[in-house]
Amino acid sequence: MIVLRREIGDVLRDARQRQGRTLREVSSAARVSLGYLSEVERGQKEASSELLASICEALDVPLSLVLREVSDKIAVAEGLHVPDTIPADVLAGMYARGGAAREDLTPVG
């Protein structure tokens, strides 16, 4: 069974680890206890939308990108094909800089 909180936690942990940051650093920047952030990353606690936004801001990763990655992981688990709509080089550039490069993203609409 797919558990949304686990998928969100996995994506957040992966983003933090790609940046080489500790739980302590991110929890301090997000103004959330280290223990609670750890539980969110392990999928043991549901993050509110406000908390999720704060963690994403601390990681300098757009909430939309986190939700997109979670959505794609769930789609794959459901056996759906997920087309790439964000070029891999753009994503790689975002993560290589330790966060999201918002200038690389073109607003829609």
Image (cartoon, rainbow, N blue to C red):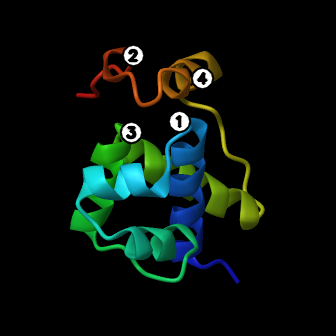
Work out whether mark 2 precedes mark 4 in sequence or the reverse, and give the earlier one: 4
Counting residues from the N terminus, which is met first, the one under dot 1 or under dot 4? Answer: 1
Label 3 amino acid? Answer: Val
Query: What residue lies at 58% left-to-right and 73% top-to-bottom?
Result: 42
Q: Choose the circle earlier in sequence order: 2 or 3.
A: 3
The residue type indicated by label 4 comes to Ala
Instruction: Give the amino acid at mark 2.
Output: Asp
Label 4, label 3: how many angstroms apart (C-alpha)? Answer: 13 Å
- Cα–Cα gap, marks 1 and 4: 12 Å
Q: Residues within 10 Å of mark 2 (few under 14, many from 20)?
A: few
Q: Residue at x 31, y 46 (%)?
A: 58
Q: CA distance from mark 2 to mark 1?
A: 18 Å
Q: In this image, 11 relative to 66: left or right?
A: right
Q: Report helix, strand or loop for mark 3.
A: loop
Vertical placement of residue 100 versus 41, above or below:
above
Of residues 99 and 24, the one nearer the viewer is 24
Question: Which quarter of the figure has residue 33?
Answer: bottom left
Residue denoted by label 1: 19
Farthest right residue in view: 79
Q: Give the residue pinned by disc 2.
A: 104
Q: Which residue is mark 4?
A: 92
Q: Residues within 10 Å of mark 4 (few under 14, many from 20)?
A: few
Residue identifier under label 3: 61
Q: Which one is earlier in the sequence, the residue at label 2 or at label 1?
A: 1
Label 1 crowd (10 A; few <14 / some 14-19 / many >=20): some
Rendered position, 20 above or below 40 = above
The residues bearing labels 1 and 3 have C-alpha atoms spaced at a distance of: 11 Å
Q: Nearer the viewer, mark 1 or mark 4?
A: 1
